[in-house]
Image (cartoon, rainbow, N blue to C red):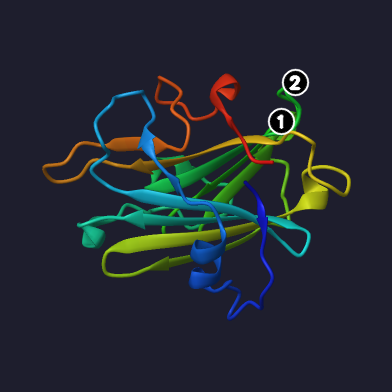
Amino acid sequence: MLTNINGEQVDGWLPEKLITNSCKKITFEYLDGAIEKPRYETKAYFFTYKGQLGLFVQCFDDDMSHLIYTHTVRDDYIWQDDNIELNLDINPESTEDDIQICVNPIGTFSDSRGKEKENWNSSVQVKSKISDHQWIIQVLLPINEISNSTLPSELKANVSRTRNGRGNTMAEDTAWKKTFSLRANIKKFFGTLN
């Protein structure tokens, strides 16, 4: 599932077409297991790039003027905003090394690892962009911050989107892998990346 991307960044971004044409597309479903198609489409792509694990996510929305992103400081309560949350299961036997990165539409993020929680600051690179009908994030996390020098033989993950309710629409929680709850970090439901 992980494609190694070769190309040059432009202003910190890998070209969108390079990612979307090279990598397997992941579409989201309701996190709680509801069988309806989500109202707001989300597409995600995992890849590797120059020693980094990459994630590229497109969050489509018909009400871009009311995106919620009030947090502007790293490691703040990003989960309260519209956000994308990446959960990595580094060790299936323990939760001590699990990594969580949460990003809002303006690129403010929080990163935590196992017991260290807020005290862990990765070298993650995050880019975000808001356009007329979608907001996009790109996350690049050095592989040597996940494990020694290579990815674990079985790296499991989940990636989710929270779109807070506004106006006449309800909140919507979607993910790559449904967990039958409103929490995306339930490891037994994670998907395998490699």
Instruction: Identify residue type, mark 1.
Output: Gly
Place of residue 36 in the rendered image (x, y in percent of width and height, measured from the top left): 24, 31
Mark 1 / mark 2, whichever is N-terminal = 2
Place of residue 160 in the rendered image (x, y in percent of width and height, measured from the top left): 46, 39
Taking the image as drawn, is residue 127 in sight?
no
Residue 94's tag is 2
Nearer-the-camera pick, 3 or 121: 3
Which residue position is annotated with label 1? 114
Is the C terminus in the top left, top right, bottom left or bottom right quadrant?
A: top right
Q: Is residue 40 left or right of residue 87?
A: left
Q: Are marks 1 and 2 in contact (CB under 8 Å)?
A: yes
Instruction: Identify residue type, mark 2.
Output: Ser
Image quadrant assignment for residue 165:
top left
Secondary structure under the numbered disc 2 in the rendered image: loop
Taking the image as drawn, is residue 91 in sight?
yes
Q: Quick one: label 1, few (<14), some, or many (20+) residues within 10 Å?
A: some
Q: At x 42% / y 51%, what residue is drawn? A: 43
**Relative to 104, residue 176 above or below:** above
Instruction: Measure the alpha-carbon separation of dots 1 and 2.
Output: 9 Å
Q: Is residue 131 left or right of residue 98?
A: left
